[in-house]
Image (spheres, coloured by chain):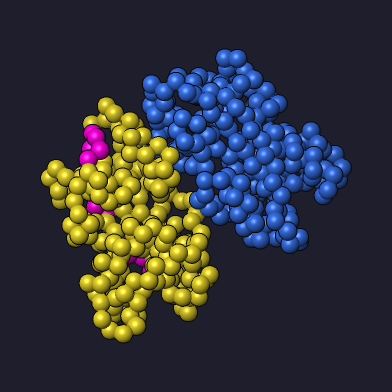
Chain colours: A yellow, B blue
Amino acid sequence: MKKGKVAFFVTGNVHKYFEARNVLSEFNIGTAMLNIEAVEIQDDNIKKIAIASALDASRKCGLPVFVEDAGLFINALNGFPGPYSNYVYRSIGTKGILKLMEKIDQRDAYFHSVIAFCNPDERTEPLCFEGRVDGQITYEERGEQGFGFDPIFEPEAERSKTFAQISTDEKNKYSHRAQALRKFAAWYALHI
Amino acid sequence: MKKGKVAFFVTGNVHKYFEARNVLSEFNIGTAMLNIEAVEIQDDNIKKIAIASALDASRKCGLPVFVEDAGLFINALNGFPGPYSNYVYRSIGTKGILKLMEKIDQRDAYFHSVIAFCNPDERTEPLCFEGRVDGQITYEERGEQGFGFDPIFEPEAERSKTFAQISTDEKNKYSHRAQALRKFAAWYALHI
């Protein structure tokens, strides 16, 4: 690894941190976890949420940082739980989503991830990198791996497995977050 | 009305504005609607959301302003939809809540309202005023008045009517928002 090539990831979620560390290491970039409180705004658009967080976090710590925001968007539920996936997971959980989806045949959904990078030295808008995985909401929970809504989401690339039934390494090959992380890492390796 | 006694309400919701105008007029206070964009953070605690919005709005416009944040908290759903009631209403709606509550006997819930007032001239934390109405989630929608989750919420004070089956005047007698508004108005009339 080239000396000193490190990216600062603002997150309090160790699962996300490990995913990021794995992907960025492919580009010889080290990942430092910055567990600081960055503002998280309410907005239907997760890109706007990520941009506001990156601006706030980089201003607070004076470092170039990246943040990641993601959500599960279920088309039959008008995008719900979307930007509030974390809260919805903590309150009604996967069982709540399955209940809302009872008797609904249209089960397509997608995970969307946005990474926003902000350098406090530059007076420009944060840069964004996005990833998306399309799939289906299952009729029951399956699998123990991953976190959040992984046990009820079957990505298109897997014929019959949920995100919680595949290993982190496997998920990191193509997950929404891995896609966004790879785009970010490729840019970071060249420009920082 | 004493000349010049006006309070600035930051909101984009005309229903809320009319509720506020009616209640504040009882205290001889005029209400001006300020439709400016104030930051709305993500937090499980609506008091924190209101405080952040009031600080941001008063800083942006240089005026003493108040904001209001409210939510419907359903105990059997761990407080869901709570601080994200607006988004949940727009995505899965009252029908989504009724579906989540199918086969659940414990139907107690409450509407909680917080008003935060911030004066940009004073370097103090915003002041908060709160109101709460306890009630039950109905088994079906009833009524056409009000807005949001009013058709599925039966307040304790009404034996068999939802918030959407009573007039705005009736609701203003004791609603969560009216309670918070009255506490705020009583303070404002004395101190501003």
Residue B150 visible, this angle:
yes
A40 on left or right of B176:
left
* Residue A107, horizontal then vertical, whole percent: 24, 37
Q: Who's the residue at 69% across and 46% down the image?
A: B128
Residue at the extreme left of the image, as rendered: A159
Residue at the extreme right of the image, as rendered: B2
Q: From the viewer's perspective, is residue B18 above or below residue A32?
A: above
* Residue A71, horizontal then vertical, whole percent: 35, 50
Q: Is residue A139 magenta?
A: yes
Which region shows up in magenta? Answer: A127-142
Residue at the extreme top of the image, as rendered: B160
Nearer to us in this view, B144 or B126: B126
Q: Which of the 4 image quarters holds residue A1? A: bottom left
* Residue A99, horizontal then vertical, whole percent: 33, 30
Residue at the extreme front of the image, as rendered: A144
Marker count (numbered): 0
Q: Who's the residue at 66% across and 61% down the image?
A: B59
Task: Point out the image quarter for the N terminus of chain B.
Answer: top right
Q: Main secondary structure of the magenta part?
A: strand
Residue A108 visible, this angle:
no
Q: From the viewer's perspective, is residue B87 above or below residue B119?
A: above
Q: Who's the residue at 36% across and 34% down the image?
A: A96
Nearer to us in this view, B53 or A94: A94
B158 on left or right of B117:
left
Q: Who's the residue at 49% across and 54% down the image?
A: A41
* Residue B156, horizontal then vertical, whole percent: 61, 21
Q: Which of the 4 image quarters holds residue A108? A: top left
Q: Is residue A59 magenta?
A: no
